[in-house]
Image: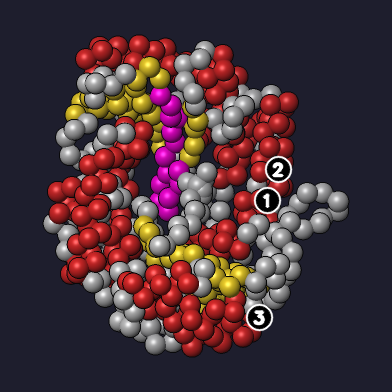
């Protein structure tokens, strides 16, 4: 049975949210620097094969493992109306290849204790693997075929499709699991960033194995893809091996390019009210536009968001959970893509307390804009971030994902190497500028899932209402 990896979420990620010199660097990501807790990305080699595939190699010798991360421009943004197609194609990579059946892939990799995962998100498809370095001769041929020679077996595909349809039906029974699908569709409209990653029942029913093959052929191109290998190997030897492994992956051209409509412009506040008439609580999201992943102020935005809703002791959690007892949890985050991003503050509360909870969240956001942050609060957030950040990139898997994220989202190793410096650069004056520029406060967009008959009249004050039924297909 395949074992899933936690992917680098470009949502910061929160990434995702998230290596240029060759060589071997033992030890963790942490690096001593004048006695401080500064850290640097270990040295790595980056090169491009003749077919255009970008390769990253980074040696780490603490454990005898190799971790592989591959990224392709093949996310849901390219579904082109066939919602769920990118998702099913990515999962379909494991349904069999030219020389390995699905069962053979699973039996061989599981016998070796290897971990493996394929999947798709909004913009990308990914493959992750982790295995003992002594198993390269067995694993690499399988990895190559998964990447370059999938056959999308019809029988296995129909089994997965049937399971997905059940999963989609069950998801609507848990509003917390689908509210962000509603929010992204509400924010992005007809733009591909609003496509539901796993699709809808009617769209999935219409997808066949031939559609997966066509999507693969159109979007899995070496020239726009990258693979990173991090672990216990010799860089020179691995470079030769990888070059030979993918030398015959000769696919020409670029991936499928779709015409994307412009992003909506919000000239007034808006409310999407999704009715679940038997609900006893309301799930809600408040937000607006965010930032692109390669925004130079990305780290500064992370610092301020830590104060607002990015940790347990954040302002939002303190006010809504600790002081008012309106929820068990509330947070805010920025989810960043190549060309745009979103900001959200998200929580839930009992139906009768819906307005009280939303009003309090808005007061906290307004406080951020009116008062800014003082030095004591800022220093606390900075110390928290500097303490939390290094462990996120100490494992081979997290480093491999970081390297492929750097490739796709067009940011470089300064994100790691200058992280502490960029955190410390945020003073109270800079904080005020960041808040004003990036934290939306006007024309906010609201999505609520709850008992519409009880909250409809009360939420009118937040903006123009659009209504939907939770049981209705789609978002």
Q: Residue 123 versus residue 173: which sits nearer the camera?
A: 173
For residue 27, side relative to residue 290 (left or right): right
User: How far is disc 2 from disc 3 in space, using C-alphas?
Assistant: 31 Å
Which residue in the protein does label 1 denote? Answer: 390
Tell me which label, 1 or 3, sits earlier in the chain: 3
- What residue sits 21% from the left and 49% below the top? 165
Q: Does the image show residue 276?
A: yes
- What residue sits 39% from the left and 66% below the top? 72
Q: Residue 257 versus residue 7: which sits nearer the camera?
A: 7
* In magenta stretch: residue 93: no
User: How far is disc 2 from disc 1 in space, using C-alphas?
Assistant: 7 Å
For the stretch drawn in magenta, the main secondary structure is: strand
- What residue sits 21% from the left and 15% below the top? 453
Label 3 secondary element:
loop
Give the x, y percent position of residue 83.
23, 52
Residue 387, label in figure: 2
Placement of the C terminus among the 4 image quadrants: top left
The scheme the figure's colours follow is secondary structure
For residue 150, side relative to residue 209 (left or right): right
For residue 142, side relative to residue 103 (left or right): right
Residue 234, label in figure: 3
Q: Which residues are magenta?
A: 335-348
Q: Residue 33 versus residue 167: which sits nearer the camera?
A: 167
Which image quadrant is residue 31 in?
A: bottom right
């Amino acid at each position: 049975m395949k074992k899933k990896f936690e992917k680098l979420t470009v949502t910061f990620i929160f990434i995702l949210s998230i290596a240029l010199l060759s060589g071997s660097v033992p030890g963790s990501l942490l690096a001593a620097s004048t006695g401080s807790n500064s850290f640097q990305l270990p040295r790595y080699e980056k090169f491009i094969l003749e077919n255009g595939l970008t390769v990253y190699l980074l040696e780490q010798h603490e454990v005898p493992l190799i971790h592989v991360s591959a990224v392709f421009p093949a996310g849901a943004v390219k579904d082109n109306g066939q919602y769920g197609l990118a998702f099913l194609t990515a999962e379909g990579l494991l349904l069999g290849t030219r020389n390995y059946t699905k069962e053979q892939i699973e039996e061989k990799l599981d016998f070796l204790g290897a971990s493996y995962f394929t999947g798709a998100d909004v913009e990308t498809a990914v493959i992750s693997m982790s295995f003992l370095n002594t198993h390269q001769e067995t694993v690499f041929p399988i990895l190559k075929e998964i990447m370059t020679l999938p056959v999308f077996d019809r029988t296995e595909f129909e089994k997965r499709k049937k399971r997905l349809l059940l999963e989609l039906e069950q998801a609507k029974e848990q509003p917390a699991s689908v509210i962000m699908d509603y929010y992204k569709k509400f924010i992005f409209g007809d733009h591909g960033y609003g496509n539901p990653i796993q699709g809808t029942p009617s769209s999935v029913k219409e997808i066949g194995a031939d559609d997966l093959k066509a999507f693969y052929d159109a979007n899995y191109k070496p020239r726009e893809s990258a693979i990173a290998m991090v672990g216990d190997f010799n860089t020179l030897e691995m470079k030769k091996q990888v070059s030979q492994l993918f030398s015959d992956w000769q696919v020409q051209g670029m991936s499928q390019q779709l015409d994307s409509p412009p992003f909506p412009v919000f000239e007034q506040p808006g409310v999407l009210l999704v009715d679940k008439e038997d609900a006893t609580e309301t799930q809600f999201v408040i937000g607006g536009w965010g930032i692109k992943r390669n925004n130079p102020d990305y780290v500064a935005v992370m610092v301020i968001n830590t104060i607002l809703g990015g940790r347990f002791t954040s302002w939002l959690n303190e006010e809504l959970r600790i002081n008012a007892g309106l929820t068990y949890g509330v947070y805010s985050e920025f989810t960043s893509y190549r060309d745009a991003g979103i900001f959200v503050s998200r929580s839930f509360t009992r139906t009768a307390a819906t307005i009280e909870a939303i009003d309090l969240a808005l007061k906290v956001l307004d406080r951020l804009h009116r008062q800014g942050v003082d030095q004591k609060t800022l220093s606390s957030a900075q110390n928290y971030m500097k303490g939390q950040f290094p462990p996120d990139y100490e494992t081979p898997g997290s480093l491999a994902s970081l390297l492929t994220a750097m490739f796709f989202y067009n940011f470089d190793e300064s994100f790691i190497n200058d992280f502490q410096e960029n955190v410390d650069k945020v003073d109270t004056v800079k904080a005020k500028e960041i808040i004003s520029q990036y934290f939306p406060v006007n024309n906010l967009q609201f999505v609520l899932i709850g008992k519409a008959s009880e909250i409809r009249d009360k939420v009118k004050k937040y903006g123009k209402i659009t209504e939907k039924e939770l049981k209705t297909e789609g978002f």
